[in-house]
Amino acid sequence: MARNGFTTLWLMPILVGIIFLVIGLMARSEALRSSWYQQTVADNMASSAATVLAREMNLLAITNRALFANELAIAQLLGLASWFQMMKDVADRSAMASSWIPYLNAITRNIANAVDNFEEPFQQILQGVLYFQRMVTTAIRATQWYARISFAMTLPKTMEQILAAHDVGDEPIKWQLLHAPGLVPVPWLWWTFIPAQASGSDNQLAHRLMLESLDPFSKKRSYEWFDALQIEVEKAGGARLHEDSSGSWSWQSMDTVSIHVRGLLDSDEYPWGDGATYLGEEIESVGAKDFGCTRKINPTATQWGVADQVEFSGNAQPFRYFNRTQLDPADWPAVIVVLPQAVAKASVVYSRPTRWFRRSDSKNEQANLFNALWQSQLKSLSQLERVLLTARVGDAHEKV
């Protein structure tokens, strides 16, 4: 019995050590669980913050396209106006030319009268629609500014809601939302990342994109109406976007039609219809390729059209939008969420799924703010970001 008691005495320290080891392992396991849980919370917060940024970029992309579509609508409306003016001339001159032909003169005169009666209400309708288009443009631009402010105000509230949705204890947890690489709080750098742009100071980017977005009717409506024997009737027309030195845009449109009588060595042109309209600055000169090459096809009718232009109310205005030209993958914005026991990083990424949205030229599309294809993605911290965050935490401890 004495021996059994002696053995028990020796086993007591071992049992106590095992108990402390189990308690330490349990405490360590709880600390690891808390750290992993905070890492999950940090990942959710970072991913949500990047999602908010991506949604703002997608909204800017959609509204940028809407602004271009609105400008295109203005070009189409002016095209309809100049086309109508041309057809009015055609109707009047056809009625005059056929006035000595029985029965036909009555038909052509009735057509000319109908066009004349429709001219004033048609002009009023177009002017009203143009006013509406300008109002829509103003509303879209206001939406862009409102979105920039509202999304910035949404970020902190979103972070608080995500943190409150997780069981992180009774005491509030301090958190930080930083711009990568982790020095400046969000959204201070976000305001400068996507600046406001205006035509005249954007290297004519908007001007080039607008010209590439023109529909066939606005770009060039030149074709042959009639060709028989030595007589040829040529129709020419199109819209033009004029940008002055200050970057203000003026839309101009012209349509002409002429009868060409071919001879042995040359041909004679007989203008039969012309129409020219503008919103902003009037047409002062016509280049060889302007308005569907009308100066080359119908030179005399083009001169008549320039001399008899129709103005629509509205001043030339710069084209304003939000954009950033440098959007390489290294420039994509990222955010870092810092919790007491966890750090997470998420970035916005641009991806165009070729399976569903394949480009017509089969090229890889570069990131831009004209297609709403931005999304969020968790990222790993770089070595530089780790160093900066470590230094930031050290400074915070020293201040405490």
Image (cartoon, rainbow, N blue to C red):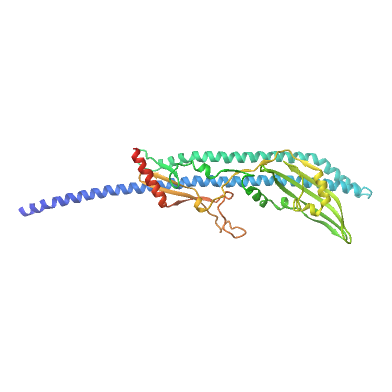
Residue ID at (73%, 39%): 127
How many numbered discs? 0
In the visual, does 247 lie left or right of 112?
A: left
Please give left or right for residue 152 compared with residue 283 in the image: left
240 lies left or right of 379 = right
Residue occupying the far front of the picture: 245
**Relative to the observer, which residue lies in front, 13 or 195?**
195
Q: Nearer the viewer, residue 13 or 188?
A: 188
Quadrant assignment for the C terminus: top left
Task: Name the image quarter holding residue 251.
Answer: top right
Q: Residue furthest left?
A: 2
| Residue 317 placement (x, y as % from top left) | 67, 40
In the image, taking residue 49 as reference, residue 206 lies left or right, namely right
Residue 9, percent from left and from top: 10, 51
Q: Position of residue 168 (x, y in %)?
A: 36, 42
Q: Is residue 154 above or below residue 47?
A: above
Please state the horizontal and vertical placement of residue 279, each as a whole percent of the image: 73, 42
Query: Which residue is at 37% across, 45% downward?
Result: 391
Q: Nearer the viewer, residue 194 or 157?
A: 194
Tell me, yes or no, if residue 306 can be seen here: yes
Q: Residue shown at 68%/47% (left/top)?
A: 72
